[in-house]
Image (cartoon, grey):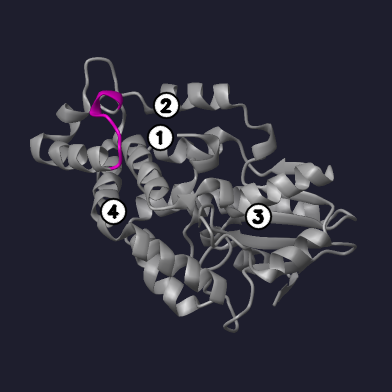
Amino acid sequence: MGRKALGWFLALGLFGGLEAQGASPVWAVSGAHNTVYLAGSVHLLPVGDAQLPRGFEHAYADSKQLVMEMDLAKVNPVEMTSWMMDHSALPAGTTLHGVLGDARYERVRTAATKAGLSMDGLDHVAPWMVGLEITDSAYLQEGFDPDDGVEEQLLRRAQADGRPTGGLETLEEELGGLAALPQADQIHMLDQTLGELADLKSEMADVVGAWRRGDAAKLGALLSTEYREFPALYKPLVLERNERWVPQIETLLNGRENVLVVVGALHVVGDGGLLERLRRKGYRITQLD
């Protein structure tokens, strides 16, 4: 799994704070002397339909720095691959077949084969990583390209403009929560992944459409229930990361230059979301059209 696709599932979020249809998933947070634009991202977008909502253009043009979950401009592919191998390998003498049992393993085999993956490369990999690999390949087959995702588009533009970039966390912080999940929760996550593959293209198309329209009710129906029913995943992937990010965003708000911060949309709104946390601290927040 390459750096451009390592956060596929973190793209999915609900925009519960949208006030009106047609608004952009971008908010202006006012500091004493500057503005931090907080944007909800979809990390993969369909080929041929990758234009960003108009709020992104305003936020980018009015900012001096681009900040992402991780600073993708500084990700070392060799180091990332090494980390993934170290943290996703099953213990010596353990196989995926042995962990999953016959029936579930055959279900994984069927899904992997359809996604163009060999079980030879997965049979000594932890369930959480198997789920990412299969889904990553399935998205690519269905025409959702990480090269067209929000961060990649903005990163290319920032690099062309010579604009500095930054990140809110390391690879360890981004994916460490998955690697640390108990095996039972990893298997639960894998089961959910397999169950969603048949409708992946249509459901992701619905997500992207609702994201573009700012359709909060639709996004909530599509995305929130699964996370809420799986608190073992929601806490490390969303809530704990939000807690770590808020002080960093406040540091940016104490500066004098405007900054565009782009994170997975689920982090931005909803219970425990960044907007809620910043509002409680007294910051004035305005949604962009």
Which quadrant of the figure contains the C terminus?
bottom right
Image position, residue 73 (x, y; %)? 69, 36
Q: State the CA–CA distance, disc 3 to disc 1.
A: 24 Å
Camera-nearest label, 3 or 4 = 4
Which mark is first along the chain, 4 or 2? 2
* Left-right relation of 64 to 192: right
Magenta residue span:
115-121
Contact check, label 2 and label 1, Cβ < 8 Å: yes
Q: Which residue is mark 4?
A: 197
Q: State the CA–CA distance, disc 2 to disc 4.
A: 25 Å
**Disc 2 residue type?**
His
Q: Nearer the viewer, residue 43 or 129?
A: 43
Q: State the CA–CA distance, disc 2 to disc 3.
A: 26 Å
**Disc 1 residue type?**
Ala
Q: Which residue is mark 3?
A: 262
Camera-nearest label, 2 or 3 = 3
Q: State the CA–CA distance, disc 4 to disc 1.
A: 22 Å
Residue shown at 87%/53% (left/top)?
A: 255
Residue shown at 53%/33% (left/top)?
A: 172
As helix, strand or loop, the secondary structure at mark 4 comes to: helix
- In the image, residue 127 sits, relative to residue 236, either above or below, namely above
Magenta span includes 87 = no
Q: Which residue is mark 2?
A: 87
Q: Which residue is mark 1?
A: 179
As helix, strand or loop, the secondary structure at mark 1 comes to: helix
Camera-nearest label, 3 or 1 = 3
